[in-house]
Image (cartoon, helix red, strand yellow):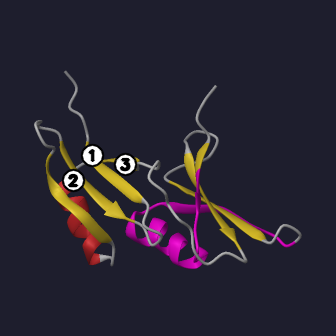
Amino acid sequence: MRLLHTMLRVTDLDESIRFYTEVLGMKLLRRKDYPAGKFTLAFVGYGSEAEQAVIELTHNWDVDHYDLGNAYGHIALEVDDVYEACEKIKSRGGKVVREAGPMKGGTTVLAFVEDPDGYKIELLGRKQAG
């Protein structure tokens, strides 16, 4: 078994694709409309779906708002340098909601950004071997 994808429901698909590709640097892997079901699926990621888990962005055509609820946590991305990643994300129009720095009570450097629908994405520095 392997993890294939995480699905997020989004209200503005083009804005979400722009965020994940232009702000976070992912690639749009595929996109398809399903007129009979009134929805569109777009898959974004850093590599091939055959080799890596990706994010499925689902846009239901007749929905303009979602309640994220209190059960969703976040998606985590590994970056080389959390401080530098935050600066790049901000320069590309992204929203950093927790600036880079050590986590409470620890030494792991992390930050949080938010996508256009309010989903949180954690940035974690690359772990050093050993």
* Extent of the magenta region: 7-35
Q: How far apart in space, not on screen, are marks 3 and 2 (Cα)? A: 10 Å
Q: Earlier in the sequence, mark 1 or mark 2?
A: 2
Residue at left offset 26%, top offset 73%? 90
Q: How far apart in space, not on screen, are marks 1 and 2 (Cα)? A: 6 Å
- Residue type at mark 2 is Val
Measured from the top left, where is residue 39 in percent x and y? 75, 69
In terms of secondary structure, where does tag 3 sit? strand
Question: Is residue 3 found left or right of 26 in the rendered image?
Answer: right
- Residue type at mark 3 is Leu
Q: Residues within 10 Å of mark 3 (few under 14, many from 20)?
A: some
**Viewer-proximal residue among 92 and 62:** 62
Residue ID for mark 3: 77
- How many numbered circles does the render carry? 3
Measured from the top left, where is residue 63 in percent x and y? 67, 75
Residue ID for mark 2: 82
Q: Earlier in the sequence, mark 3 or mark 2?
A: 3
Question: Is residue 58 found left or right of 84 in the rendered image?
Answer: right
